[in-house]
């Protein structure tokens, strides 16, 4: 709470995330999880300006070195010195009544409901960053396939609708998730399964045509196989999900390639502070809303178990 840090009271909202359930061996232990945080400032440390007790804030979770070329460009999610991590991943996070946060990580959220503000810091920021990376291909009239309408995917549908004029095809195994995608405004929904590629191809046309952009928020082998089979020549695959699948890339000329020619593949990570500010602006303008289920802090383990089982639709938010 000193050295130009602000102590943000996280007693309002900290979402659970599948990345936290999969980071065994990647994070120091013991550690307090919780990398999506919003709350009210309890105490500002000496020298902190622009923040006072009671201010409401969202927390940008990445802490880069601040010195490398990426950080100097404001791209701390690409820091070339500090290993991948952040608040709640490599240092104590928000699954507690209080969390100590550098003041530079805070963004004002005004009077926004904190259970809505917290998911913006990852479930909103990560798909927004992925869409920004694909922006040159997301021209009016193009097609974007969104695979996995969960915590990040349902936000991606809204971000695409708010910032582009593309046709959105939502894909998921869950009928409830597809219903949510339809209510949010997806133009087409396709249930994942053995005939999913054929159904998507009916919408986007046969090769070499296809989807201009595919956002995979699952990253399992079946979703990666679907993604590479429906993307267009010259399209872009953005692999956001962390389920451990493998994307085969075999450059060949005498048989169909495993990934279409001229196709870009990107593995996005979180996003920048500037992008988070834009995400907050979308939410405050009413164009981005997280579908949340809330749990008290004492039931955090149950929330993670529900997440593992696939029982969470949208985002689970822990409220101490």
Image (cartoon, grey):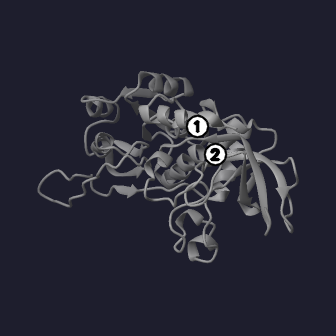
Give the secondary structure at mark 1: helix
Q: Is residue 293 left or right of residue 236?
A: right
Nearer the observer, 11 or 73: 11
Task: Please tell me which of labels 2 and 1 falls first in the chain.
Answer: 2
Q: Quadrant of residue 206?
A: top left
Decide if residue 288 is in sight here. no
C-beta proximity under 8 Å, tags 2 and 1 = yes
Q: Quadrant of the N terminus?
A: bottom right
Q: Quadrant of the C terminus?
A: top right
Q: Is residue 244 left or right of residue 308?
A: left
Residue beneath the point at 44% across and 40% down: 144
Residue beneath the point at 43% across and 58% down: 25
Q: Is residue 71 left or right of residue 7?
A: left
Mark 2 Cα within 10 Å, few/some/many (few <14, many 20+)? many
Nearer the observer, 90 or 81: 90
The residue singled out by tag 2 in the image is 95
| Count of marks, rendered view | 2
Residue 222 location in percent, x, y? 29, 40
Nearer the observer, 60 or 43: 43
The residue singled out by tag 1 in the image is 300
Decide if residue 266 is in sight here. yes
Residue 180 location in percent, x, y? 51, 25
Residue 196 location in percent, x, y? 29, 31
Q: CA distance from mark 2 to mark 1?
A: 8 Å
| In the depicted structure, whether residue 32 falls above or below residue 206 | below
Nearer the observer, 20 or 76: 20
Q: Is residue 151 left or right of residue 288?
A: left
């Amino acid at each position: 709470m000193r050295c130009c840090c602000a102590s943000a009271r996280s007693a309002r909202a900290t979402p659970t995330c599948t990345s936290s359930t999969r980071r065994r061996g990647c994070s120091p232990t013991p550690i307090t999880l919780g990398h999506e945080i919003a709350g009210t400032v309890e105490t500002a440390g000496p020298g902190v300006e622009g923040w006072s007790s009671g201010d409401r804030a969202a927390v940008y979770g990445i802490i880069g070195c601040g010195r490398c070329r990426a950080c100097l460009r404001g791209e701390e999610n690409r820091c070339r010195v500090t290993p991948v991590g952040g608040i709640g991943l490599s240092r104590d996070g928000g699954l507690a009544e209080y969390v100590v946060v550098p003041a530079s990580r805070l963004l004002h959220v005004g009077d926004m409901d904190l259970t809505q503000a917290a998911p913006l810091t990852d479930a909103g920021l990560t798909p927004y960053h992925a869409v920004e990376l694909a922006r040159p291909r997301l021209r009016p009239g193009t097609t974007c396939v969104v695979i996995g309408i969960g915590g990040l995917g349902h936000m991606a549908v809204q971000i695409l609708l708010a910032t582009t004029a593309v046709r959105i095809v939502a894909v998921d195994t869950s009928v409830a998730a597809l219903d949510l995608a339809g209510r949010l405004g997806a133009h087409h929904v396709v249930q994942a399964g053995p005939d999913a590629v054929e159904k998507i191809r009916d919408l986007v046309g046969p090769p070499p045509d296809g989807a201009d952009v595919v956002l995979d928020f699952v990253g399992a082998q079946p979703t990666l196989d679907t993604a590479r089979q429906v993307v267009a020549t010259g399209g872009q695959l953005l692999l956001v999900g962390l389920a451990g699948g493998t994307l085969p890339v075999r450059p060949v000329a005498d048989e169909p390639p495993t990934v279409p020619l001229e196709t870009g593949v990107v593995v996005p990570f979180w996003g920048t502070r500037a992008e988070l500010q834009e995400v907050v602006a979308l939410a405050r303008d009413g164009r981005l809303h997280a579908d949340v289920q809330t749990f008290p802090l004492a039931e955090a383990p149950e929330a993670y178990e529900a997440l593992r089982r696939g029982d969470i639709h949208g985002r689970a938010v822990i409220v101490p």
